[in-house]
Image (spheres, rainbow, N blue to C red):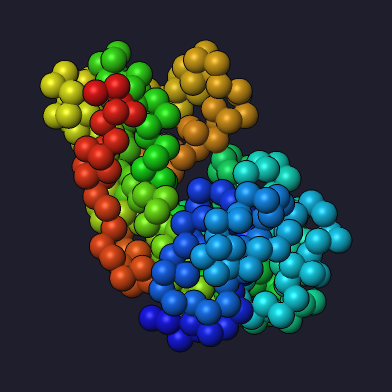
Amino acid sequence: MSKFINSTLLVSGASGNFGRIAAEELLARGATKVIAGTRDPSKLQDLAAKGAEVRKLDFDDAATLPAALAGVDRLLIISTDAVGRRATQQQAIVDAAKTAGVKHIVYTSAPAARPNADAGLAPEHFWTEVAIAASGLDFTILRNHMYAENVLMDGAHVVSSGQLFGLIGDRGTAYVTRADTARTAAGALLSAEGKTIEDVTGPAPVTNVERAALFSQLSGKKIDVISLTPADLTKGIAAAGIPEGFAAALVAFQRDAVTGFHGVVTDVVERYSGRKPTTFADFLSANKAALGL
């Protein structure tokens, strides 16, 4: 599980929630040369104290890329939050990695990444995957499924209102925690070889009906599932004040759940992290306060 423990490993975006967990996991598992890349090195002095080397890395600043990647063997590219620009950002880091002599890229992608115009946020991930494949480098594409944490964004409202809105006929979402995916990425950086694409999932798909039942169980309240068409759900999300473009992306996620793309279940979390993935029920129980309970 740790074949590359003595290789030089770089984690991009290490000051973010995902990147910090991944960097800390590498250190905890005995990696000897961990580099934490960040736009603001002052935010990572605690990681430096634990043994990581901190380097300035800004995908929008080409001047930072050669120095950040110098001597790096294996690179974890955590997809940025710059929706609309990240395909360009990530193309830049892939190109720089090839020039710098990086041997293996691990990238955090999304399920069913494809270029379709109606695929929500998937096209940016797809084109980054294409860039990585075209680089000629070895790679591990980790298609992280829906983060369980995303449910907390409207979870309190669902519980208080007693209504959960979703598309008709969803076939479930294999929610996975951010910590599980970050530890999986660290494990892939330590051990993955060749050229692979992997789905990173929770232990079981959870439908809207099952999600509502879990909310009911925790809250003691009846939660009704209100099934809508894609057009009506988009209007409802937009009416709640969410920008139209992001509303469309959220509906695209749910449309993929109806198709079945989010119901895939794999052993990737356990294989790379050495731990079984957290169940959705256990995640909700641990986050009752965020649900207003």
* Residue 222 falls left or right of residue 153: left
Give x and y (percent) for residue 156.
Answer: 33, 22
Q: In the visual, does 160 lie left or right of 190?
A: left
Q: In this rendered view, identify the residue nearer to me: 201 or 177.
A: 177
> Does any portion of residue 209 appear in the rendered image?
no
- Counting labels gives 0
Q: Quadrant of the N terminus?
A: bottom left
Quadrant of the rendered image containing residue 45: bottom right
Q: Could you tell me if residue 85 is visible in this image?
A: yes
- Image coordinates for residue 162, horizontal then vertical, percent: 25, 16
Q: Residue at x 55, y 35 (%)?
A: 249
Residue at the far front in the pictured view: 49
Q: From this viewpoint, which residue is outermost toward the right?
A: 63
**Vertical side of 170 occupied by 74: above or below:** below
The residue under the point 68% across, 43% down is 82
Quadrant including the C terminus? top left
- The quadrant holding residue 259 is top left
Q: Residue at x 29, y 58 (%)?
A: 277
Relative placement, left or right, of 122 versus 180 is: right
Q: Position of residue 114 (x, y in %)?
A: 57, 54
**Residue 178 appears at what percent x and percent y?**
42, 50
> Image point 53% across, 85% down: which residue?
6
